[in-house]
């Protein structure tokens, strides 16, 4: 609590203050939960299964958007902070109670929810998918991981004397078994003077609930930017013990590009600790050394890479 002494004058003001004089929205927390997952349940002999980035979705069991897919989330309860809402909903949907969870955007566009004025606080969540199971909540009858692909379909730049606009069309495709849902989301970045504004619009939507296609696109963009700027965030997708190959693989999956191994390992060196553990890598190959996050250096801001 803030140490604030309420004066008699302020007490009188608060006693007569009518909070119902202003319309108030309902608040929700929606989580874009990402994990690195195997792309095949039955890998080929002597070949590591392909891994891909997955996002957790629920199939809604009731209206609105019945049978459509959306992100796990829910309404804030009375006297609950929005961060507490996010943690509670994440645990209810996935059983995860200790994951990377960070807000990255507020979604309040008029008409985004047919039930009324509902403002969503979106959170980026990262988990080790093999460690947790998922289960549907009260308004969902199916919770499942979808493999995610996000590609730039078109990008245009318009530069004027004192301003500029960059328009990017993102094609979002999510797949699991025999289910595919997709969307086309337009990002517009406008520059005027020293100011930058960014806006998004859903142009096509096939199977998503609410504006969750936009939330997923923006969450993945945020994850890619954080990974490129400081790959520390990727460690929250890893198990406690991991190989350097798997760590590099996770970076490459998120960024969608190959990295030079010597450069990558040199940059990672301060943030990992070699252990005495090893893992078998298959016939004809030496066991690979397992590493852990170097906690001492990991949260030391003097370490940069």
Image (cartoon, rainbow, N blue to C red):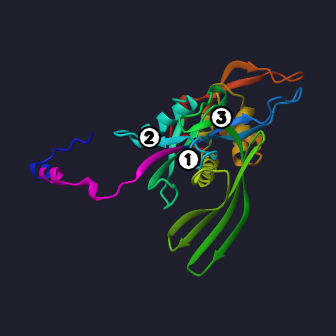
Residue assigned mark 2 = 83
The 10 Å Cα crowd at callout 3, few under 14, some 14 to 19, many 20 or more, is few
Residue assigned mark 1 = 63
Numbered circle sitting on residue 269: 3
Estimate the spatial distance between the alpha carbons at disc 3 and disc 1, rounded to whole Å.
50 Å
The 10 Å Cα crowd at callout 2, few under 14, some 14 to 19, many 20 or more, is some
- State the image coordinates of residue 79 (x, y, percent, origin top left): 34, 39
SS at mark 1? Answer: loop
At 88% across and 26% down in the image, what residue appears? 46
In the rendered image, which quarter is residue 94 located in? top right
- The residue mark sitting in front, 2 or 1, is 1
Seen from this angle, which residue lies furthest top? Answer: 276
Give the camera-side residue of 36 and 290: 36
Tell me which numbered mark, 3 or 2, is placed earlier along the sequence.
Answer: 2
At 64% across and 28% down in the image, what residue appears? 239
Q: Is residue 27 left or right of residue 130?
A: left
What's the magenta region? 12-30
Q: In this view of the protein, can residue 302 be seen by the observer?
A: no
Instruction: Kindly indicate whether the residue at mark 1 contacts the one at mark 3 (C-beta within 8 angstroms).
Output: no
Residue 24 falls inside the magenta stretch = yes
Estimate the spatial distance between the alpha carbons at disc 3 and disc 2, rounded to whole Å.
33 Å
- State the image coordinates of residue 247 (x, y, percent, origin top left): 70, 35
Seen from this angle, which residue lies furthest left? Answer: 8
For the N terminus, the quadrant is: top left
At 57% across and 54% down in the image, what residue appears? 211
In the rendered image, which quarter is residue 161 located in? bottom right
- State the image coordinates of residue 111 (x, y, percent, origin top left): 51, 60
Give the camera-side residue of 214 and 46: 214
């Amino acid at each position: 609590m803030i140490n604030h002494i309420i004066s008699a004058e302020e007490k009188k003001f608060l006693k007569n203050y009518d909070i119902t004089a202003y319309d108030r929205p309902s608040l929700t927390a929606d989580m874009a939960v990402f994990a690195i997952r195997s792309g095949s349940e039955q890998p080929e002999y002597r070949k590591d299964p392909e891994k891909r980035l997955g996002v957790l979705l629920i199939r809604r069991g009731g209206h609105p958007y019945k049978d459509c897919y959306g992100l796990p989330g829910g309404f804030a309860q009375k006297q609950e902070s929005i961060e507490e809402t996010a943690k509670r909903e994440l645990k209810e949907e996935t059983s995860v109670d200790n994951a990377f969870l960070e807000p990255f955007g507020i979604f309040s566009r008029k008409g985004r929810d047919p039930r009324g004025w509902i403002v969503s606080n979106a959170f980026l969540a990262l988990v080790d998918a093999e460690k947790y199971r998922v289960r549907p909540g009260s308004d969902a009858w199916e919770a499942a991981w979808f493999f995610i692909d996000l590609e730039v379909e078109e990008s245009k730049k318009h530069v004027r004397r004192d301003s500029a606009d960059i328009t990017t069309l993102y094609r979002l495709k999510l797949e699991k078994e025999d289910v595919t849902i997709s969307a086309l989301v337009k990002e517009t970045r406008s520059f005027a003077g020293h100011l930058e504004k960014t806006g998004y619009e859903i142009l096509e939507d096939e199977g998503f609930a609410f504006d969750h296609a936009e939330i997923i696109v923006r969450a993945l963009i945020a994850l890619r930017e954080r990974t490129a700027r400081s790959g520390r965030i990727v460690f929250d997708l890893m198990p406690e013990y991991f190989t350097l190959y798997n760590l590099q693989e996770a970076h490459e999956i998120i960024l969608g590009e190959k990295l030079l191994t010597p450069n990558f390992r040199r940059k990672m060196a301060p943030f990992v600790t070699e252990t005495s553990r090893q893992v078998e890598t298959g016939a004809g190959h030496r066991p690979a050394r397992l590493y852990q996050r170097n906690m001492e250096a990991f949260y030391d801001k003097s370490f940069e890479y």
